[in-house]
Image: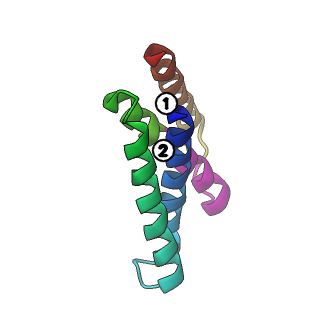
Amino acid sequence: MAWTLLTLAGLFEIGWAIGLKYTEGFTRPMPTILTATAMVISVVLLGLAVRSLPVGTAYAVWTGIGTVGTVILGIVLFAEPASALRLVCIALIITGIVGLKVAAG
């Protein structure tokens, strides 16, 4: 259950990171409210996950999911560059996330 909560927390992290772009510097009320809500949900779910997962592992996986998802959506939604080096770096982050999951048991 903790890993499910952590995965959901990571997905909400992607949501608020992408949401920041749509707030236009927190000048648009609805995107700002949705982004702030996603932030709170993400941190609450992370907090619930660390009750039974090592905090270092949980935090690294949470930020890794957020980083990879945000970069991928940045490429898809905002036409950010998808260079070979960027894609290799994403693969390395994913490898690290999987490694931490395996090491945590």
How many C-alpha atoms fall within 10 Å of the one at disc 1: few (<14), some, or many (≥20)? some
- The residue nearer to you, when weighing 84 against 74, is 74
Quadrant in the picture for residue 79: bottom right
Q: Secondary structure at mark 2?
A: helix
In the image, taking residue 105 as reference, residue 25 lies left or right, namely: left
Disc 1 marks which residue?
93
Q: Residue at x 35, y 27 (%)?
A: 54
Relative vertical location of residue 58 with respect to residue 41 in this rendering, above or below:
above
Of the numbered discs 2 and 1, the one sitting upstream in the chain is 2
- The residue nearer to you, when weighing 96 against 77, is 96
Q: Which secondary structure type mostly characterizes the magenta part of the structure? A: helix
Quarter that holds the N terminus: top right
Region rendered in magenta: 65-81
Which x, y percent locates residue 29? 48, 85
Amino acid under disc 1? Ile
Q: Residue at x 47, y 67 (%)?
A: 37
CB atoms at circles 2 and 1 under 8 Å apart?
A: yes
Amino acid under disc 2? Thr
Which x, y percent locates residue 84? 60, 34
Disc 2 marks which residue?
67
Which x, y percent locates residue 28? 48, 84
Residue 10 magenta-highlighted: no
